[in-house]
Image (cartoon, rainbow, N blue to C red):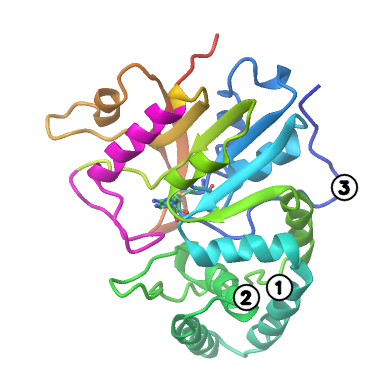
Amino acid sequence: MAIKDEPKTIKVAKPFVKWAGGKGSLVKLLSTHLPDDFCNQDSITYIEPFVGGGAMLFYMLTHFTNIYRVVINDVNKDLIFCYNLIKNNPQTLIKQLKLIEKEYLQLPNMDEKSRYYYKVRDDYNNKEIIDKEKAAFFIFLNKTCFNGLYRVNTSGKFNVPFGKYKNPTICDEKLILADHKLLKKVEIYTGDYSNITKYLGHNYNYIYIDPPYRPLSGTAYFKEYSHNIFDDKEQERLKEFCDIMTDRGCKIMQSNSNSMDNHGESYFTKLYQGYHITQIEAHRYINAHVGKRKKEIELLIKNYNNRQ
Ligand SMILES: C[S@@+](CC[C@H](N)C(=O)[O-])C[C@H]1O[C@@H](n2cnc3c(N)ncnc32)[C@H](O)[C@@H]1O
């Protein structure tokens, strides 16, 4: 039996950062699109080359006991440093975060909190090499910035404004420790997604791909995640990567937007001929109206078909 029930009493491992494009609200639905033979396999290598906040990663690791090897990767070096720190030395991170949390929460008003935020943002940007202190800054900024975005300017400096939250949780010790328990068995890499070809397993490789989405219309690319724009050339390069992984026998599922090309036709249906494309309904928060949600159609692009 490969599926585990979610434990009710202990803290369940979940993303330790909010992340743009995070899949938290979709993980259950995504898991219904795993290959039909997924639960019958006894030694799966699970791979996420664009791991971000890792909503799907943590869901898969808490629910499937037949995953025996896990490989994750992201181009964001500071994010990956945090994953490594939580894997290898969670107490160091907890200590650093508690120091910041204490200082921040005792500030008497939003103006002072805002000043503190911008001071940490400067310190974060001025520190070139990532260490435990910069990792704590990274998490603090993520919890207190506007909408948990990670966006950098052309010089690569983090430039998201203060989020004005009343009581943000800055150090979630129990969550960090729950994540640590699961990350102990995870191989963690940083760099371009294509590097993961070096780390495929010998048996059943399952790759969940969650790249920066193609904008729904036009060329409204956001410089989120890193200063490299994930444009149409990048989407085409990713398609070639999927073809190579398919030839190597991997099972792949990709999330992307229901984007149209200049002729009003589905961009991904044209690009991914021969793949199985399903439309799913996602409920997304609208940035400008915190709390309001809207329904959006997204795509799941798979190199296998499900019975249902
Ligand atoms: C849509 S987000 C992934 C969200 C994630 N599934 C979650 O639940 O939080 C896309 C991720 O791709 C990463 N990324 C962008 N370009 C990349 C590249 N060339 N190689 C690897 N990762 C990349 C970004 O840093 C970002 O974390």
Q: Is residue 183 above or below residue 263?
A: below
Residue 230 part of the magenta segment: yes
Of residue 88 and residue 182, the one placed in the foreground of this image is 88
Q: Residues within 10 Å of mark 1 (few under 14, many from 20)?
A: many
State the separation of the CA atoms marked 2 and 3: 28 Å
Can you identify the residue that label 3 sits on? 9
Of residue 33 and residue 135, the one placed in the foreground of this image is 135
At x 72% / y 27%, what residue is drawn? 43
Of residue 211 and residue 219, the one placed in the foreground of this image is 211
State the separation of the CA atoms marked 3 and 1: 24 Å
Amino acid type shown at disc 2: Ala
Identify the mark at residue 254; answer none if there is no mark.
none
Residue 308 part of the magenta segment: no
Magenta stretch bounds: 218-245
User: Residue lying farthest left?
Assistant: 263
At x 38% / y 27%, what residue is drawn? 243
Q: Is residue 125 left or right of residue 233?
A: right
Mark 2–mark 1 CB contact (< 8 Å): yes
Q: Is residue 187 visible?
A: yes
Where in the figure is residue 289, as x and y percent of width and height? 41, 57
At x 27% / y 35%, what residue is drawn? 259
Where in the figure is residue 284, as x and y percent of width and height? 45, 45
Amino acid type shown at disc 3: Thr
Query: For residue 171, which quarter of the picture?
Result: bottom right
Q: Is residue 10 left or right of residue 252?
A: right
Of residue 33 and residue 83, the one placed in the foreground of this image is 83
Amino acid type shown at disc 1: Leu
Camera-near label (3 vs 1) is 1
Identify the mark at residue 136; answer none if there is no mark.
2
**Which callout, 2 or 3, points at the residue further toward the start of the chain?**
3
Q: Quadrant of the C terminus?
A: top right
Can you identify the residue that label 1 sits on? 93
